[in-house]
Amino acid sequence: MFENLSDRLGKTLKNISGRGRLTEDNIKETLREVRMALLEADVALPVIREFVAKVKEQAVGTDVSKSLTPGQVFVKIVQKELELAMGGINETLDLKATPPAIVLMAGLQGAGKTTSVAKLAKFLTDREKKKVLVVSADVYRPAAIKQLETLATEINVGFFPSDIKQKPIDIATAAIDHAKKHFFDVVIVDTAGRLHVDESMMDEIKDLHAAINPVETLFTVDAMTGQDAANTAKAFNDALPLTGIILTKTDGDARGGAALSIRHITGKPIKFMGVGEKIEALEPFHPDRIASRILGMGDVLSLVEEIEQKIDRKQAEKLAKKVKSGKGFSLEDFRDQLVQMKNMGGMMGMMDKLPGMGNMANKVKDQMDDKLTGRMEAIINSMTPGERDRPDIIKGSRKRRIAAGSGTQIQDVNKLLKQFAQMQKMMKKMSGKGGMKKMMRGMQGMMPPGGMGGGGMFGR
């Protein structure tokens, strides 16, 4: 998300010159560029006007300290205003009610509402250690009920069965009653989506809300619809007392207009964002971290949290011991590392969160596309255990068999073996004296030829 805005703002904010003080003259052109960047990002006009006015008000007359450039001071002001535009702080779910705490999910059809129910259930189970029950009150789409049941089984949370012959209120109240008897902490109620905002839909969800009195009423909205997402959220907010927004499909949205418009237009916080198709791909929305990402400063805090959540510690310790004891690093270990990286949103997801790597991520997309990680994994899976353990035995006929089995070319197998050999050397250096320094030097050898810009693993 925000690739276009980040790129445009990055170029714009470098261009501020001047001495000692920010004035209307030396920021005029930059403010115009900021306005254009926000328009291109499909941010709503009232939001742009207020944002630019606030930045100008904060900036004009600000003294520039000797340790900073005018550009750096201006970036700090823009960052603060971006944070405030998106809500300032992360607002968590308020689940302090007498159990079960009821969460009502609303949204248009196709916004990813049912998937978000499952993602939220997984998030609450894994991170908050809650016992969660999910139920579908969508009596218009039997497929939605079945989809939620399948997802609930996959993530191992409680599912309350419902039927299209029942009334939504009857379904929800029966589920809540069941949750009380079986000591569930949270009940998440999925509701019917429509293709557009219509009166009968609003009346139905209003009645349901009044009957079950949820502690959280969350609206799921597709980030890719830009400022329309904010307008749809406002229509729902006028009818329902929303407590927050879940912004879905942010991984497919290069502009970011929805994230920057919703808070201003609805007055309600974005509480979560969907960052991929996987069931784990739901992140709390932190305006300060997002602002940092927009300005190309990365989001190291989210990356650290992700590592803590998704890295298999036992496996990592086992590999560290193995490498330290000098037993070497096998293709099996290499594949495990690829899988771990995939679980964390892949190479591109990680690069997006590293400071200064936003633009770099775009440049290397062709060379380090996450599909390539899958291809590398497929090649290793096509090998026998003996080949994985002793890659030096992989010659002509074996290479042909591995390439055929993984649906790749022989040159792809060769490239993987070459990259693995470099990784092996790096691991050897790590196990010796002064290992980390040697490893950092070795990392340069892992880059595609000519640095990040060319060739690369499977570059075509």
Image (cartoon, helix red, strand yellow):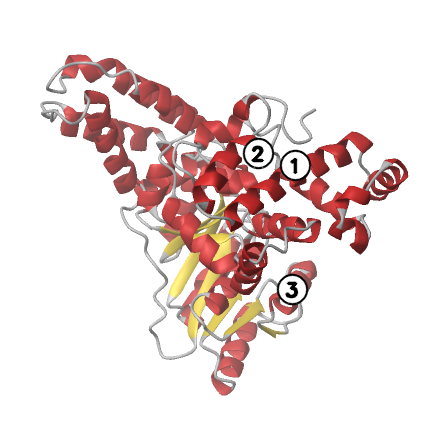
Q: Toward which corner of the image does residue 66 lie, by quadrant?
A: top left
**Which residue lies under the disc numbered 1?**
419
Please state if 333 lies on the left or on the right of 9 as rendered.
right
Instruction: From the image, tell me which residue sits under label 3.
Output: 145
Identity of the amino acid at label 2? Met
Give the residue at mark 2.
446
For marks 2 and 3, the one nearer the N-term is: 3
Q: Nearer the viewer, residue 289 or 44?
A: 289
Q: In the displayed structure, would residue 38 be above or below residue 284?
A: above
Viewer-nearest of labels 3 and 1? 1
Marks 1 and 2: CB-CB under 8 Å?
yes
Question: Could you say where residue 227 lies in the image, as x and y percent from the top left?
Answer: 43, 35
Residue at figure coordinates x 50%, y 87% from the top left: 181
Q: Does dot 3 land on a helix, a strand or a loop?
A: helix
Nearest the eye: 122 or 228 = 122
Nearest the viewer among 286 and 40 is 286
Q: Would you say residue 364 is visible in this rendering? A: yes
Q: Is residue 86 left or right of residue 377?
A: left
Seen at 76% across and 45% down, the residue is 391
Asked which secondary structure carries label 2, the reply is: helix
As measured in the structure, the alpha-carbon distance from the residue carrying label 1 to the one carrying label 2 is 7 Å
Rate crowding at label 2 as few (under 14), some (14 to 19) or many (20 or more) other CA atoms within 10 Å: some
- Can you tell which quarter of the image residue 72 is in? top left
C-alpha distance separating marks 3 and 1: 46 Å
- Categorize mark 3 by other alpha carbons within 10 Å: few (<14), some (14-19), many (20+): many
CA–CA distance in space, label 2 to label 3: 48 Å
Q: Secondary structure at mark 1?
A: helix
